[in-house]
Amino acid sequence: AAIYATVDGTPGANDTPGELLFHTVADGANDISASNTRMVIKADGKVGIGSTAPAYLMHVAGTLGIKATVPSLYFDRGGSYTWSIRQGDGTGSFPLSTLNVVNNGGTPIMTFEDGGNVGIGTSNPDMPLHIRSAENNLLHLESTDQDALFKLEDNGSGHFQINVAGDNASFGT
């Protein structure tokens, strides 16, 4: 294994932009020339893991794992507003085996259960799509052309549909 400091850019009269390269060598290899760059910190502060040309402040090329008692990913706008995605731990509003999108107040607003149910406004969905709200308007479906079709179907054996064409609506089976 090795850590290298190299020039990253064009040196000026009073500056030398640098980067740090972190290398590892595979098990059984004795030659550092057979090493691979595993991580880089560029002169602009961007960090690449699995990438030597990070496009973002933190750029991971590959699978990223987050392992903790309550694995969470936070989106913070400098403390003014924070959202998170977190795995449920079986306490409070976070049932076990769920993935939750959480608002600034810490309330889950969308829940994905590992059985496939999705809840919006509920952290305990009892159907494939469960929407719960104190508002009278629960669902807005919008077509971007002049026609729209809303269809409820029972495994192909029967259905009910609402068809909107221009200014006309029809109901049928």
Image: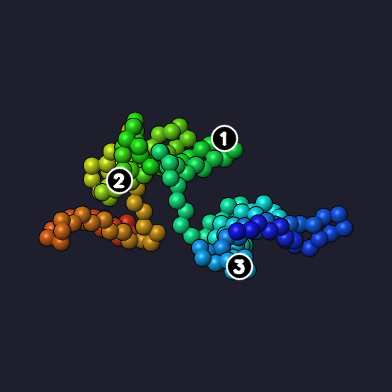
For the N terminus, give its image quadrant: bottom right
Q: Are marks 3 and 2 in contact (CB under 8 Å)?
A: no
Mark whose residue sits in front, 1 or 3: 3
Q: Amino acid at mark 3?
A: Asp
Task: Say which residue label 3 marks.
Answer: 31
Residue indicated by mark 2: 113
Q: Position of residue 132 (x, y in %)?
A: 30, 38
First in residue order: circle 1 vs circle 3: 3
Q: Is residue 139 visible?
A: no
Q: Residues within 10 Å of mark 2 (few under 14, many from 20)?
A: many
Q: Residue furthest right?
A: 13
Q: Which residue is mark 1?
A: 80
What residue appears at the point 31 percent right and 39 percent down from the top-left corner? 96
Q: Is residue 87 above or below residue 150?
A: above
Q: CA distance from mark 1 to mark 3?
A: 50 Å
Pointer 1: residues within 10 angstroms few (<14), some, or many (20+)? few
**Element assignment for label 1:** loop
Can residue 18 be seen here?
yes
Q: Is residue 56 above or below residue 31?
A: above
- The residue depicted at 40 percent of the width and 59 percent of the height is 144
Answer left or right for 67 relative to 26.
left
Residue 164, image quadrant: bottom left
